[in-house]
Amino acid sequence: MNKRAEEEFSPNILAYGLAVLIIITALIINYEKDCKEDLTCFNQAFSSCERAKVIAYENDNTFEYKIIEKEKSDCKVEVTLTEVNPEIEPSIQEMFKDKSMTCTLPIEQEFTLDQLNLCQGPLKETIYELTIQKMYNLLAQNLGDIISQMKK
């Protein structure tokens, strides 16, 4: 190969090499482990806050949990209710369908959603809204009993 051909060839190899390096870096950075339905796999990823997702079933509801990112000593997890229990009344199903929330959870603890106060988003708001509705209905049903006990 003559000198001129080498000079034309080198920048092309460098450009292709750089492009491949950028693509590989983007794939590594955006890699998300798919744990399918394996909560143990997801818990292992959560313990180091590695990007992962899992499908979980609770009370005939289907959830998708996704580890988004690490924030100091916390791990941000997106929780989406993808399928609502078919036995629940249709209006409530509609309220919850495809709602999600983001939870910022301490990594040193095992993954759990017991502390709803660490979450924010439409799913949390809908849970609170339904809870308030149920409490109001319970209070309204028992208001007569409560008033009569107060008069005694």
Image (cartoon, rainbow, N blue to C red):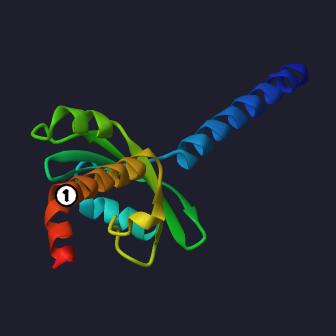
Amino acid beneath label 1: Leu
Q: Residue furthest front?
A: 151
Position of the C terminus, as image quadrant, is bottom left
Q: Residue at x 40, y 45 (%)?
A: 100
In the displayed structure, would residue 151 be above or below residue 129?
below
The reply, left or right, for residue 77 in relation to residue 11 is: left
| Viewer-proximal residue among 147 and 27 | 147
In the displayed structure, would residue 48 be above or below residue 32?
below
Q: Which residue is mark 1?
A: 138
| Quarter-of-image position of residue 24 | top right
Position of the N terminus, as image quadrant, is top right
Q: Position of residue 56 (x, y in %)?
A: 24, 51
Q: Residue at x 29, y 60 (%)?
A: 41
The reply, left or right, for residue 13 in relation to residue 24 is: right
In the displayed structure, would residue 30 be above or below residue 109?
above
Q: Position of residue 143 (x, y in %)?
A: 20, 61
Q: Residue at x 53, y 45 (%)?
A: 30
Residue 38 seen from this side? no
The reply, left or right, for residue 139 in relation to residue 71 is: left
Helix, strand or loop for disc 1: helix
Q: Position of residue 46 (x, y in %)?
A: 40, 65
The reply, left or right, for residue 48 in relation to residue 22 is: left
Q: Residue at x 45, y 59 (%)?
A: 119
| Viewer-proximal residue among 61 and 16 | 61
Mark 1 is surrounded, within 10 Å at the Cα level, by few (under 14), some (14 to 19) or many (20 or more) other residues, namely few
| Viewer-proximal residue among 117 and 143 | 143
| Viewer-proximal residue among 17 and 93 | 93
* Number of numbered labels in the structure image: 1
Q: Residue furthest left?
A: 87
Residue 19 seen from this side? yes
| Quarter-of-image position of residue 15 | top right
